[in-house]
Image: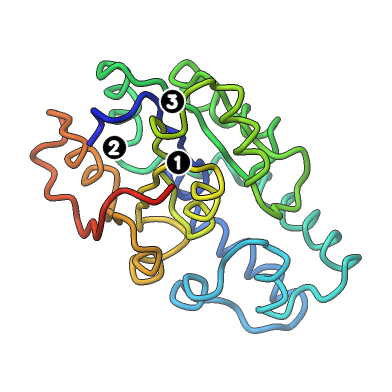
Amino acid sequence: MLRRYQHLIWDWNGTLLDDLQLCIEVTNSLLRQRRLPPLDLTRYHAVFGFPVRAYYAEIGLATTEETFKALSVDFISAYEARRLETRLHPGAEELLAAIPARGLTQSILSAYRHDTLCEIVAHFGLTSRFVALSGLDNIYAHSKAALGRAALARLGVPAAKVLMIGDTLHDLEVAREMGVDCVLVSHGHHPAERLRQGGVPVFPNLHALGAAFGLPAFQSSGSGGGGNGNLVSR
């Protein structure tokens, strides 16, 4: 799978960073403050998406621009206060370390604010694994499509030689807007049944992805775990 590519673009939250439980807990604290019913994992997986404002509206949290902006501040403040409670997904460090040996470079494209993205990547000692980190310049998580197109232009790598790896259907949408291939992992913010609607390979975790990449350290980790189609559509 890797032979056709020169560069991997990783999503951060949910793909490399396991922050699913933290996001649910922070969201539920906001819901409780407003006397709204909390989310369980099944409900969260069913409704979470981008733009985040639409997701907030779906669960009863934001209906106007003013309330959305205030809610975004509340969410980010609570999330940032606890972000160091998060951990990398199993296999993340090993996979990121193994990719360069195959001659590929790597970057991150995230809806996380750029400065905080750089800080937490550094916290985990991963900065040197990437040639670029690209995050948004705000906290509202509307979309990262425009950011992705700009990042791709800066990389100078042909789109046909780039693979994006994410955990949501938004990552797939962004990949398609960028004209790059995409695979998805289902250990993050969207479950496998939603991800499979995109018609691209879906893997249960990073170990399965590493095995599909043909990396020796991951060959005993199991199969590709449900990849369902050719690598994606440009």
Furthest-right residue in this view:
66
Mark 2 → mark 1, Cα distance in angstroms: 24 Å
Which residue is at the front of the view, 131 or 124? Answer: 131
Task: Choose between 151 and 92: the one closer to the eye.
Answer: 151
Q: Residue at x 66, y 38 (%)?
A: 147
* Helix, strand or loop for disc 2: loop
Q: Residues within 10 Å of mark 2 (few under 14, many from 20)?
A: some
The residue that mark 3 highlights is 106
Q: Which residue is mark 2?
A: 91
Residue found 29% across the figure and 37% down from its top: 91
Q: Residue at x 67, y 68 (%)?
A: 29
Identity of the residue drawn at 58% across and 63% down: 25
Q: Residue type at mark 3: give it.
A: Gln
Is 114 above or below relative to 36? above
Viewer-nearest of labels 3 and 2? 3
Q: Secondary structure at mark 1?
A: loop
Which picture quadrant has residue 190?
bottom left
Apparent side of residue 10 relative to residue 218 in the rendered image (left or right): right
Relative image position of residue 204 (x, y in whole percent): 27, 55
Circle on res. 180: 1
Q: Residues within 10 Å of mark 3 (few under 14, many from 20)?
A: many
Identify which amino acid the numbered label 2 is placed on. Gly
User: What is the secondary structure assignment of the residue under circle 3?
Assistant: strand
Picture quarter with the N terminus: top left
Judge by depth and name the residue closer to the eye, 80 or 184: 184
Judge from the rendering whether residue 112 lies leftward or rightward of residue 193; answer left or right.
right
